[in-house]
Every structure is written in structure tokens, then in C-alpha cells.
Amino acid sequence: MPKPKRPPPKPAAGAAPGILELDRFSSADLRRWEALSADLEELSRELFFALRPARDRLRPQLIDALQGSPHLTSLPIEHWARIVPHEFSLVPLSAAGSLRSFGGRFNAGVELDEGTLLPWPALYLAEDYETAYRERFAAPRSDESSGLAPQELALAGRDSFSVVRISGRIDNVLDLRTPTALDAVAKLYRRIDMPERAKTLRKRLGLTNRRSYMVRTAQQLYVSIFEPNWRGRPAQFGLPANGQILAEIVRASGYEGILYKSTKGKGDCLAVFPDKITTNSYLALSDPAPEETRHTRLDIESADELCGFDTLPRRLGRSSFI
């Protein structure tokens, strides 16, 4: 015997006939939400700008700690993968695209607020095609399948892209695949106290101690750098993410790149800073390229053109980044 059909829900009192109300709020709710949003933005800006003097005072020690890190490595690269938007198909080793918008996990883009971080480029690649694909199109990791499902491939429907294989060697790489690589940095960060105004805002917003926004351990810093929604603060407030703040100090410490675990695939990823590349480091296309391809090799000779600084707005001079 078939089950009787459940009658449709009744419209809320005062709702127009035939309209199913999804939510209800008042003008007072809107004002409260606007106030909370303003407090959250003020808290975020307070935690960046008010803490900058403390970070600046610690900067020499942070650089010393990173330069003496046991996680410095020389990385051989054999047929790693890079996915390039169609517009950059003839310059697959150019990092110009990384300067757009808010930048990447380990580089700053042009849309971060003035007075935060000046832009610098990074060339991103992964050790296999699947990891590169998942990173490029934010396809979630699936431990149950060894390949890309059709619905994941469909994510690329709007974009044309090229896949290139890259080999080479980068001599000075910070291996950031474990939280222990951040022990020395976190030890210094522990000296920084939360500003009083930030404490007031945190209390007003009802944030718990777990959401204190102050880094005290290497694990906390590691998690904040590799959180899935790392773009939230840059997109919402125009402020750098923790990974971008750290990468700026890593670059100043003389590193040419950062090695890290993919947050989407099973392989490793590498962010290379082309403007910091040294004499013995290079990246080259593993396979023959079309005749029109500009630069099949990134090295100290070609780095200047492949950085993409010429694509920046005129108000941002190249001299600011060196």
C-alpha cells in the first residue's frame, strides 16, 4: 500500500500565498550583522597592522632562524606537472599569472591592500598531473579513487589550459611538508602579545580561546597556512594570509622556493620565486615545445622576463620588490 503524501508546509503568517519562506529577519538583525561585520574587519586589521611593529622587530631573528633551518634542501625535479591557462600557453614558465588578484598561497598579488605586502611572483608546480589538476581547479581530494572522476574533469569546462612537464633543480628550498619546519618561527611568534583593542573586539564577537588568532605553536601556524579557505582574509579584507606573510620572510632569507604537501592531491607541490633564482638552479620544459614558445627554461638569465613584473600597475615600481 503506497504511503500517503506529506502535505506541503504551510506558509508563515503574513507570507504571500504560494511562497515558501526560507528565512526571516528584521531591520534590527541587519544592523546587528553589520556591526559584527565591522568588528570582525577591525579585528582582522588590528591583528595585521598593530602587530606589524612587533614582527618588524623580530624580523632579523626570523631570518636568522630560517637561514639556519635544518629543513633547507636542494630539490631535483623530474617531470613535474604544471597547468597553464591557454593565454599563457606560449610562456608556460611565466609567473605573471600569480601576480593577479590576491596572489597565491605563497605569493602576494596586486589586489592586496596598499600598505600590506608588495606583490612578488611565484611559479607553482606539482609532482604529478593529478595533484596539479586538483590544485589548479580546487578539486577535492578523494582517497577512494586513484584517478580523476568525470564530474571533476567537468570543472575544467569553462577554461582552456595546457599541461607541461618540467624538470630541473632548485638549490635553496624550504621543506615545509611538516609542522616541525616552523618550530623556530613559532618560538619567536610566541613573544608577540595580542593588542588590547583586539582582545576587546574578540570578546565582543564572542570568539573563544581556540579562535584567538594568535599563533603559539608550530602546529597552529602550519594549520593556518594550509587551511582550505586561506583566501578568506585576502578576499574579504584585502589582508595577507599567514602563508603570504611567512613567504615574504622566507624570500628575504634567501630561499628560492617552498616545498609543501598538496591540500587537494596526494603529491607534493613547489612554489618557486623566479626573482630569487640563483646560478645553479633552473627549470626546463621536459618535452619539445612549439617554435613560438618563449623561454623553454627558467634560469638566472631568463628570470627577469619570466617574473611578470612588467604586467604590474605603473604605481608599483619594480625597485620596490628587490
Image (cartoon, grey):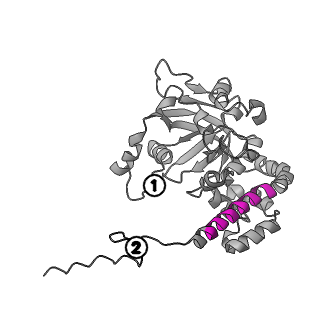
Q: Secondary structure at mark 1?
A: loop
Q: In the picture provided, is 222 more to the left or to the right than 22?
A: right
Q: Secondary structure at mark 2?
A: loop
Q: Which residue is label 2 attached to?
A: 15
Residue at the left extreme, as displayed: 1
Residue at 26 percent of width and 79 percent of height: 6
Q: In the picture provided, is 65 more to the left or to the right than 259?
A: right
Residue at the right extreme, as displayed: 57
Mark 2, Cα crowd under 10 Å, few <14 / some 14-19 / many 20+, is: few
Residue at 56 percent of width and 45 percent of height: 269
Q: Is residue 21 magenta?
A: no
Q: Which residue is label 1 attached to?
A: 140
Towards the viewer: 173 or 84 = 84
- Earlier-in-chain disc, 2 versus 1: 2
Q: Amino acid at mark 1?
A: Pro
In this rendering, does residue 71 appear at all?
no
Distance (Cα) linking label 2 and label 1: 40 Å
Q: Which mark is residue 274?
A: none
What range is drawn magenta here? Answer: 31-51
Towards the viewer: 169 or 133 = 133
Above or below for 290 versus 10: above
Above or below for 116 versus 10: above
Q: Position of residue 80 (x, y in %)?
A: 51, 38
In this rendering, does residue 221 appear at all?
yes
Residue at 67 percent of width and 72 percent of height: 210
Q: Position of residue 302 (x, y in %)?
A: 64, 24
Query: Residue 308 appears in which quarter of the rendering?
Result: top right
Of marks 2 and 1, the one in the foreground:
2
Q: In the picture provided, is 156 more to the left or to the right than 198?
A: left
Q: Amino acid at mark 2?
A: Ala
